[in-house]
Amino acid sequence: PIGSVLITKNFVIPAWVGYDIGCGLIAVKLSAQDKKINLIELITKNADKTYSAVNKAVPMGMGETNTSEAISEETKKEFAQLINDFSKNLYNKEILNYIKNASIKHLGTLGGGNHFIELSHHNNELWLVIHSGSRGIGHKVAQKYMIKAAGSENNYEKTFPLSIDSQLGKEYLNVLSFGLRFALLNRIEIANRVIMAVENVLKIKLSSKLWTNKNHNHAILEKSQYIHRKGATPAKKGERGIIPANMRDGSYLVEGKGNPKFLYSSSHGAGRALSRTQAKKEISMEEFKKTMEGITGTISQKTLDEAPRAYKDINKVMEAQEDSIKIL
């Protein structure tokens, strides 16, 4: 289930991490280099232009990819380092070839479903929040290892442990490490594109500071145990996190309290109140438009299943985990 945290010793379980290895969020604090500029006022005035520019700058949607030429040189260098590090550990040749040839075009792309780019403000500060993962590459490789762990193409999403001392276990841990780093690199490339798009529209220079990167599909080695989180955010004491609500209410920036009862974790978002099919049946375009008044976003038939009412009340969700996190 989405929102599960499970701990193992000496074993790792691909299905407990799921498909989008490294899926997560970054929060970036933005400020105008010219301190006289009221950035919130300026971006609010240019909301429609900014929205269009970001849409053009970042490929979005299921299966959307990038051309290699469009990816920044810095990201390409980082990607080459990732491949180099991956090939130093135990790997499957077919997987290495696939990663080498297929994954670069996924960098700087958002994906579909509940993945998003958000520009929002709080106390006169501008924030960029991005939710995306390791894209098609993470999905394909994760599926291959779930099938390998199960030894069959039937019911491979169930619990099939891999010993960390086995060939498959070592290969999977290598794939996991690659996926986590690749997903972060993807989010950083998206952030850089968004910042450039905003600068071009507003005709100003921005300073940016990465506030946190938090992924919520992983298995992390801590104190000789593997904490598997599938749709759950780490919340160790003092650890920064991001919990999004929906496309109307923005995101909460939080700090972990390090609660062992919660296995040092929090939710990774409000969670759905309606399935995608239910949302499309129950929510009208009229209601969707009305609830999104004052916000510039993708309000269309295609995104009806992402309407605010499709999600649980974020305030109740935050109350339910107040022993695990503090809202900043």
Image (spheres, rainbow, N blue to C red):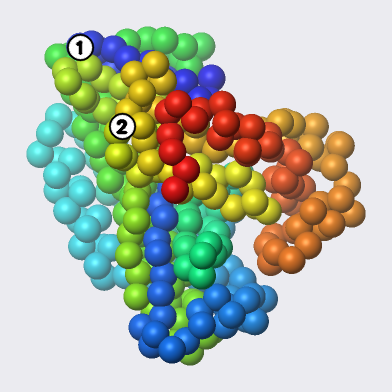
Q: Position of residue 142 (x, y in %)?
A: 39, 30
Residue 245 or 23: which is nearer the viewer? 245
Residue at 32 percent of width and 28 percent of height: 258
Residue at 43 percent of width and 43 percent of height: 254
User: Element under label 2?
Assistant: loop
User: Element under label 1?
Assistant: loop
Answer whether labels 2 and 1 touch (C-beta < 8 Å): no
Residue matched to label 1: 10
Above or below, 306 relative to 118: above
Above or below, 92 relative to 73: above
Q: Is residue 222 visible?
A: yes
- CA–CA distance between discs 2 and 1? 22 Å
Residue 215 horizontal side relative to residue 309, left or right: left
Amino acid type, residue under disc 2 in the picture: Lys
Above or below, 19 relative to 184: above
Residue 184 or 120: which is nearer the viewer? 120
Pick whichever of labels 2 and 1 is earlier in the sequence: 1
Sort mark 1 into few (<14), some (14-19) or many (20+) by Cα contacts within 10 Å: some
Mark number, residue 236: 2
Residue at 25 percent of width and 55 percent of height: 79
Residue 27 horizontal side relative to residue 83, left or right: right
